[in-house]
Amino acid sequence: MSADQNLTKDQSNPAVDGKELIRFDKVTKRFGSNVVLDELDFSVNSGKHVTLIGPSGSGKTTILRLLMTLLKPEEGTIRVGGKYLTHEERNGKLVKAGEKHIREVRKNIGMVFQQFNLFPNMSALRNITEAPVSVLGLPKDEAEERARELLDMVGLGDKTDAYPTQLSGGQQQRVAIARALAMRPQVLLLDEVTSALDPELVAGVLDVLRDIAHTTDITMLCVTHEMGFARDISDQVLMFDSGRVIESGTAEKMFNEPEHERTREFLSAVL
Amino acid sequence: MMSEKFFTEWFLPGIWITVQVTVYSAALALAVSFLIGTLRTSPLWIVRFASGTYFEIFRGTSALVMMFWMAYAVPSLLGIQFVPMAAGVLALGLTYGAYGSEIVRGALAAVAPAQREAGIALNFTKAQRLRKIELPQAWPEMIPPFNNLLIELLKGTALVSTIAVADMTFAGNLLRLAKGDSAPIYTLLLVIYFVFAFLLTRGMRLLERQANRRMGKTPPEKTGFLSGLRSKSATDAVTGTGGAK
Amino acid sequence: MNWDWQVVDDFMPKFWDGVLVTLQALGWGTLIAFSLGLVWAIALRSDQKWITWPVAAVTEFIRNTPLLVQLFFLFYVVPEWGPTMSPLTTGIIGLGLHYSTYTAEVYRAGIEGVPVGQWEAATALSLSKRRTWTAVILPQAIRRVIPALGNYVVAMLKDSPMISAIGALDMLGEGRAFSDTTFTTEALTVVGVAFIVIAYPASLLLRALERRLVR
């Protein structure tokens, strides 16, 4: 299985210069009186694979949803590739971003959901081609050719015409991964992508993601409970608790010699 | 019971007029349903308010009163004169469109929020999400209630006979006045309406199956002649959205 | 724009007469629809095919054919071999009969919504069929369907002007008679507005009721 050529490291990608790609500045997110993120600061450099770990309710998924603009922060700013995601500059002042600005910045971000969220009204192929054609303006032939390559890559070359309801959970999730990649995002957000799968289907999905991680330059931000997978692919692991990053480091360090008491507790509970 | 002359000069054309009124007012009602139903999901309160007002006003209106108003009051009130059939079609289309908008709004609201999120993640515009994701997914859900509404509309077309549109009910009344023998003619009328309703339901079933196939679903075949001309969904009846009356 | 308030003024006494007739038709029609619908619904649950089949056929037929033609049938055909009835009486029977086929569906859904366990419990206590229905099933079923029944009352209100087609002097009947004799149209507008004014608060009330009764 080899990753899509268009995504390989050989190709020069101006976005991959090891510089800061994502930056959260004092981001606060509340649901009612429940503070999920509390003045969170953190950044991710481009090309890195970062895994967010921590107990449930610690705000990991919220970070992905904020980046995908599915949620809006109450306070603070988020930047992607140097551009504000939540705000835009007008007459030298920062104001809440409009739809047009958001779409411009958001086009660099892709996401794979826990529940796959494939469009049930479209075949696997059209799930993948629809956005490249109607959002990026790719010619239909080109989009389809690319979609077939991507389906091959995720091992579903024979399922182009299948509808989501005719696919297993694992197959659906692999189509969803292909769909996200078809938009050529700089950042791929993976939100507990194996949590909704039957145990025997998890490995297939993780293999695809490993392959992408090892053969492409896509920056990955990953929330997962699969610690083995996290250890394999992560350049950096962030430990969250109560809406804050309490410890971070390489996968090696975080899994083998965590410093913080909470991290040790959490890892001993899940490993 | 009716002379051949009457049959070819009044009754057959009457059936054809009924078909025409049904088709035209169904087309208008469908357009109004989608327009108003979609606007009622708008994030802008002013749009929601305006479309909601349309819904409340036309839902509260009696189609028959509306028809008389269009046919007789509007010409003197606003100086617009409709041909009788246009008045009938407008009254039916606008009122049944209001009921239909509730079907569209409800079906759109029932599309899983996760689908909207997936659309955002792929950077679709709002209009693209509506057109490519939300409406196509809501469509199969709309067909059974639309079927109920279509039958109500078919029944409503008989009202145009009261504003001198020569549909089949009008022809029936003419025959009664001419012959005084009303039992066979009204029985025949009722049977024709019933057959039309039955055919429309069969057509909508086909549409429903086709729509479900496009979603990759194969619904169980409903069998039996009287196995519900309408889709008798229990939840519909309980929440009162069934006939969208 | 052609509007004369004087005409409206002149119409008002007739209008109120019409309101009274409309309310009568609605009140009695509702009574018939609610009770006859319950009879249909219970008959449809019978395990005797010779009961369910004709009832299903008749209700389907009535529900899928126009009320207007049914009114003509009741008014012009029935007297040929049965009693002659006034337009209002015919209208009440027509409305009630037509809408009983809708309320039957509502009751049916409500009855099916009662958990199977309730039937089983009634059997376990050896309640008679009659007690099972009146003490166990119907009280639970009807409570849940009150808003849906209410919706059909509003629908019946909006269909009630059809009785003017057989000569009943309801709101529309009075409006038409007045307009025809005075060569004016204001009365029709008044009647149109009146329907909206009555139907809107009624539907607000129903929604409030629905929120309270259907959890």
Image (cartoon, coloured by chain):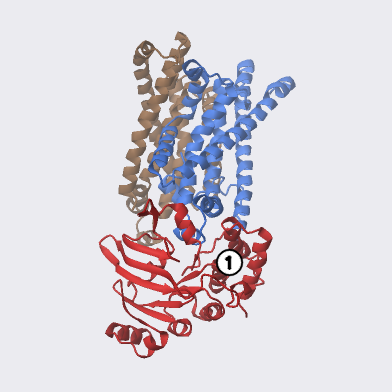
Residue C35 can be seen, yes or no: no
Nearer to me, B64 or B30: B30
Q: Position of residue B7 (x, y in %)?
A: 71, 24
| Residue A121 vs residue A70, the one in the foreground | A70
Per the image, label 1 sits on a secondary structure element best described as loop
Q: Looking at the picture, does residue C176 appear above or below residue A121? A: above
Q: Quadrant of the C terminus of chain A?
A: bottom left
Chain in red, by letter, is A
Viewer-proximal residue, C132 or C20?
A: C20
Q: Where is residue C21 in the image (x, y as percent from the top left)?
A: 38, 22
**Residue for point 38% across, 64% down:** A78
Seen as rendered, the residue at the extreme front is A92
What subunit carries mark 1? Answer: A
Identity, as a three-letter code, of the amino acid under mark 1:
Ala
Residue matched to label 1: A182
Horizontal arrangement in the rendering, residue A6 relative to residue A45 (left or right): right
The relative height of residue B74 versus residue A233 in the rendered view (above or below) is above
Residue placed at 66% from the left, 59% from the top?
Answer: A140
Q: Where is residue B71 in the image (x, y as percent from the top left)?
A: 52, 20
Quadrant of res A43: bottom left
Give the chain coloured blue. Answer: B
On the image, which quarter does residue A121 sit in? bottom right
Relative to residue B203, is residue A213 depicted above or below? Answer: below
Q: Residue at x 43, y 65 (%)?
A: A82
Is residue C49 shown left or right of residue A156? Answer: left
| Residue B227 located left or right of residue C22 | right
Location of the N terminus of chain A by quadrant is: bottom right
Q: Position of residue C138 (x, y in %)?
A: 36, 49
| Chain (brown) | C
Residue at the extreme top of the image, as rendered = C182
Is residue C196 something one can see in this rendering?
Answer: yes
